[in-house]
Every structure is written in C-alpha cells, then in structure tokens.
Image (cartoon, grey):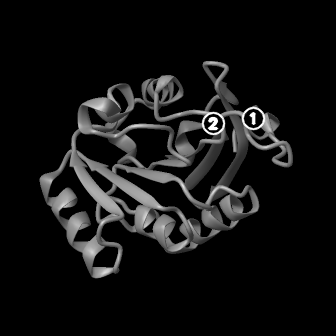
C-alpha cells in the first residue's frame, strides 16, 4: 500500500480547486487504501464519495474513517477492482457521472494503458469529469488523450511520483495542456 503523500495531495487539490472540480457531485477514490484522497474530496466540497479497493481491510477502514471524519451517509466503500468499477459501475449501485475520479494504484500492480482505456470508456466519465492518476516517473509519460474523451490537463512531477490530470469536456476556462504529456517528465 502506498498512499498519496500529503504534499502531493495538497498540490492536486489546489489545481482541482482552480478547475472548479470540487463543488458538488461525486468523487470515486480507486485503490482507496484508508480513503484519505476521497475524504479530502468530501472535506473540500464534493457531496459524496465512493471508495473502491480490492482489499476488504481497506474498504472496512474507509467505512470507519468516513464515520470518524463526520461524513456518515456521504461515503460508501465497495470491495472490487478498479477495472470492475470502471467497466460496470451499475453492478455496484453507482450511477451517474463522477465529478472526480482518482486512480492511485500500487505502481507495480497495474497496466496503466489498460486502466486508462477502461477509465476513458467508463459510464462514470461524462462532461466535466476530472480524472487524477498517480504514476511512477519511471513509466515515462502517459498519453495526452484517451479514446478522444479524456484530454490531458496537467502532468506534474513530485520526486518519484507523477500526477496526471485529465478531463472530459472540461469547462472553457480550463486550459488543456496535452504538450505536458508529450515528452518524458
């Protein structure tokens, strides 16, 4: 388990705030671990959060943390893979588009190309959805767009960690920067 570092999380949420991505709507915290990323989304203005992890220990911890942080009734944890949730959210009672989806997987355990392809085709993604992906600098760089639905907004390096932010039909004031994805970070 490798949670998003606090300083990286703060930088991500500062960017998301500038993009108006934190008002109302649903967050989906994939590979949630203890739920810190989704809990932060709730604390910053999103209405509800879905916490997704394959580990029952992680989903149980998330449920406890939601209550402990005073967000009872605004968050729920689902035990499944990120790919299962992305491909079939309706099977888990998750409907509608997310305002924010975060993908913070264990670096060595995922195929980022497959994960991004699944995310770009997901019913969770719709107009105004922002997707945050954490990946290792050793990977090089993710693609600037996926399935003509997700366009690269930002791609920033923090030590060994890289954060990519994508959006589906972002608001006009958000300036996509696919060039940040064109060369290794």
Secondary structure at badge 2 equals loop
Q: Residues within 10 Å of mark 2 (few under 14, many from 20)?
A: some
Secondary structure at badge 1 equals loop
Residue drawn at 58 percent across, 33 percent down:
126
Image spot of residue 9 (x, y percent): 54, 67
Query: Which badge, 2 or 1, comes first in the chain's sequence?
Result: 2
Residue drawn at 35 percent across, 48 percent down:
106
Question: Which residue position is annotated with label 2?
Answer: 141
Position above or below: 65 against 13 = below
Q: Quadrant of the N terminus?
A: bottom left
Question: Which residue position is annotated with label 1?
Answer: 183
Image spot of residue 131 (x, y percent): 57, 44
Q: Nearer the viewer, residue 104 or 149?
A: 149
Residue drawn at 17 percent across, 50 percent down:
55
Q: Quadrant of the C terminus?
A: top right
Image spot of residue 14 (x, y percent): 68, 67
């Amino acid at each position: 388990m490798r949670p998003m570092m606090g300083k990286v999380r703060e930088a991500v949420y500062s960017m998301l705030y500038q993009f108006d991505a934190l008002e109302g709507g649903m967050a989906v915290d994939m590979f949630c671990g203890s739920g810190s990323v989704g809990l932060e989304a709730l604390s910053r203005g999103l209405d509800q959060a879905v916490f997704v992890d394959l580990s029952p220990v992680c989903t149980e911890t998330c449920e406890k943390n939601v209550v402990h942080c005073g967000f009872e009734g605004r968050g729920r944890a689902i035990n499944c893979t990120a790919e299962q949730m992305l491909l079939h959210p309706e099977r888990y009672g998750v409907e509608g588009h997310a305002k924010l989806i975060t993908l913070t997987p264990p670096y060595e355990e995922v195929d980022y190309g497959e994960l991004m392809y699944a995310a770009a085709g997901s019913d969770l993604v719709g107009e105004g959805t922002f997707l945050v992906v954490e990946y290792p600098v050793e990977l090089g760089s993710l693609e600037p767009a996926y399935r003509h639905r997700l366009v690269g907004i930002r791609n920033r390096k923090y030590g060994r960690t890289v954060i990519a932010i994508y959006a589906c039909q972002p608001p006009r004031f958000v300036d996509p920067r696919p060039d940040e994805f064109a060369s290794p970070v």
